[in-house]
Amino acid sequence: GEWYLYATVMIDEPAPIEPLDWLGIDLGVVNAAVDSDGVVYTGGPINGIRRRNYRLRRKLQKIGTRSAKRLLKLRRRKEQRQVNDINHCISKRIVRVAERTQRGIVFEDLRHIRSRIRATRPQRRTLHSWAFEQLQAHTAYKACRVGVPILYVDPAYSSQTCPECGYVAKANRPKQAIFKCGQCGLVGLPDHFAALILRDRGRAVVSLPNAGENSYLQAPSLAGGS
């Protein structure tokens, strides 16, 4: 008794702009994204939704009745819609900043990350529910519509590398939320510093003139994205 209309709209894509610089975007769980300007796109709403639904799912799974299973399905769909809406809002903001400042966007290439990382059981649950692919995909098609280019670079050690002096060490991260360089003493938000490293790797890939200051970075291979 329900009817659905599926309509496809063809939109001409503009030619990619020649970026004046690059905007690095570090993706995470606590913070959905942090850009190289230091802007934090919080992941709090997503994490709160997932935690509440996880507790509810456990209760409903124990009940096991038909109505409980029906409610489980409804909650799962609602969670997907909520997370999708939040990622749409974040991706719009990222693309708007890049378009306004005539910069390209640099993402970390996170393909196969779930199979690469070793994690405890609670961490695996968080990792497997991480919606980074959706956020990258939403950003990619929105950027394509306005001609903003996107790079996907190797994220290796980006969270352990000092953006000031280039010193790389695991000890640079004494805590998850703190970065303190063991060589030059630079202190700050790890996600912001990682975004700066991604920006610099984007500069190195395309050999922009202002990449000279960060020549200690090796230009990673460019990887295609969504």
Image (tube, grey):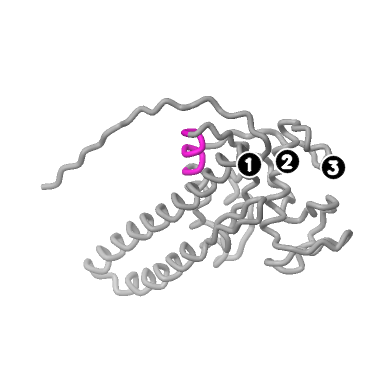
Task: Please state which amino acid type lies under the numbered disc 3.
Answer: Tyr
Q: Which residue is mark 2?
A: 201
Furthest residue to the front? Answer: 100
Closer to the camera in the image, 135 or 223: 135
Considering only order in the chain, which callout, 3 or 1, is on the residue closer to the N terminus? 1
Residue 141 covered by magenta stretch? yes
Instruction: Determine which quarter of the picture holds residue 206.
Output: top right
Q: How many marks?
A: 3
Task: Please state which amino acid type lies under the numbered disc 1.
Answer: Val
Q: Which residue is mark 1?
A: 106
Task: Give me the residue at 34% from left, 69% from top.
Answer: 61
Task: Please state which amino acid type lies under the numbered disc 2.
Answer: Arg
What is the C-alpha distance between the residues marked 2 and 3? Answer: 10 Å
Give the image location of residue 49, x and y in percent.
42, 66
What is the C-alpha distance between the residues marked 1 and 3? Answer: 18 Å
Task: Give me the residue at 69% from left, 38% from top.
Answer: 202
Considering only order in the chain, which callout, 1 or 2, is on the residue closer to the N terminus? 1
Residue 124 covered by magenta stretch? no
Label 1 crowd bin: few (<14), some (14–19), many (20+), radius 10 Å = many
Q: Which residue is mark 3?
A: 216
Furthest residue to the left? Answer: 1
Q: Are marks 2 and 1 in contact (CB under 8 Å)?
A: yes
Q: Secondary structure at mark 2?
A: helix
Label 2 crowd bin: few (<14), some (14–19), many (20+), radius 10 Å = many
Q: Secondary structure at mark 3?
A: loop
Region in magenta? 138-145
Residue 38 numbered mark, or none = none
Task: Give me the residue at 51% from left, 65% from top.
Answer: 44
Furthest residue to the right? Answer: 183
Is residue 182 found left or right of 77 in the rendered image? right
Magenta stretch, overall SS: helix
Label 3 crowd bin: few (<14), some (14–19), many (20+), radius 10 Å = few
